[in-house]
Amino acid sequence: MEVVIVPDAKAGGELVAGAMASLLREKPDAVLGVATGSTPIPVYEALAALVRAGEADVSRARIAQLDEYVGLPAGHPESYRSVLRREVLEPLGVEEDAFLGPDGGAADLVAACAAYERALAEAGGVDLQLLGIGTDGHIGFNEPCSSLASRTRLKTLTERTRADNARFFDGDVGQVPRHVITQGIGTILDARHLVLLATGEGKADAVAAAVEGPLAAVCPASALQLHPHATVVVDEAAASKL
Ligand code: GLP
């Protein structure tokens, strides 16, 4: 695992966007796995700037979603599909048909999970998966004690994650869905390159557990230790307990 310490979130965003741009030069139809949350926003801003400057070409790229809430009404602004449309697809000018994601509104959610696994496989797998990290060490929505071999499936959120995410729902934890679909840890580990980005002091404990703690399901992000090509990009604050 490679750990890169950057001065701040903007520098982290530029570094990761640069890695995406160089991947797209080698493989124009690469599958970029994207994450939600506040942390990856500087990456998407920096990548959009590279596209505007003609330094990144996303015209053939495909974008794959990491996880999704279950049960939000179609088009809800905080469904991860809506968030990614707003933060990634529209600024980059990527068409909807280049987007792969699980259907959190499906009548048969188990079938929706299996369908998403198939869609990822048919796309040839994820080339670069960007990950954030939860304060409890979760990746995607794989909460502590998720199987390290898990595949895309339904999960129940912990109260801690619901409280962390309440800020996207007018601060009202009651509006945060209890259930989600997430790529499993095994699914995430299938990506050819994993890039975990963490910024701010609030992530310092989770980063230390993921990078220097034991490989353990209690810290899902520690699964990156198993991956042959994993890069952890952290600012000084998130690196402060390493
Ligand atoms: C959610 C997402 C994760 C993300 C995490 C951290 O739980 N499912 O993919 O990593 O939030 O979000 P933030 O970057 O806002 O701290």
Image: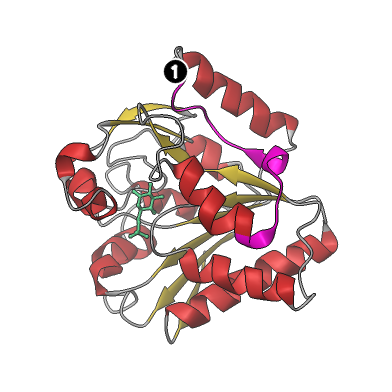
Q: Count neighbours of disc 1 (C-alpha within 10 A) and say few if under 14, some if 14 to 19, many if 20 or more.
A: some
Q: List x then y, in percent, for residue 203.
A: 29, 66
Q: Name the residue under label 1.
A: 109
Horizontally, residue 158 falls left or right of residue 108, namely left
| Residue type indicated by callout 1 | Leu
Q: List x then y, in percent, for residue 236.
A: 36, 83
Query: What residue is rendered at 50% in x and 23% in y?
Result: 113
The answer to whether residue 31 is above or below residue 88 is: above
How many numbered discs?
Answer: 1
Query: What residue is rendered at 58% in x and 56% in y?
Result: 88
Q: Nearer the viewer, residue 44 or 189?
A: 44
Q: List x then y, in percent, for residue 55.
A: 78, 75
The answer to whether residue 56 is above or below residue 151 is: below
Query: What residue is rendered at 74% in x and 36% in y?
Result: 123
Q: Which of 217 and 197 is in front in this view?
A: 197
Q: Nearer the viewer, residue 17 or 192?
A: 17
Quadrant of the rendered image containing residue 182: top left
Q: What element carries label 1?
A: helix
Horizontally, residue 105 falls left or right of residue 25, namely left
Q: What residue span does the magenta drawing correspond to?
A: 91-106
Residue 127 can be seen in this image: yes
Q: Nearer the viewer, residue 13 or 121?
A: 13
Residue 194 can be seen in this image: no
The image quadrant where one finds the C terminus is bottom left
Magenta span includes 79: no
Quadrant of the rendered image containing residue 156: top left
Query: What residue is rendered at 58% in x and 70% in y?
Result: 16
Magenta span includes 102: yes
Q: List x then y, in percent, for residue 224.
A: 47, 53
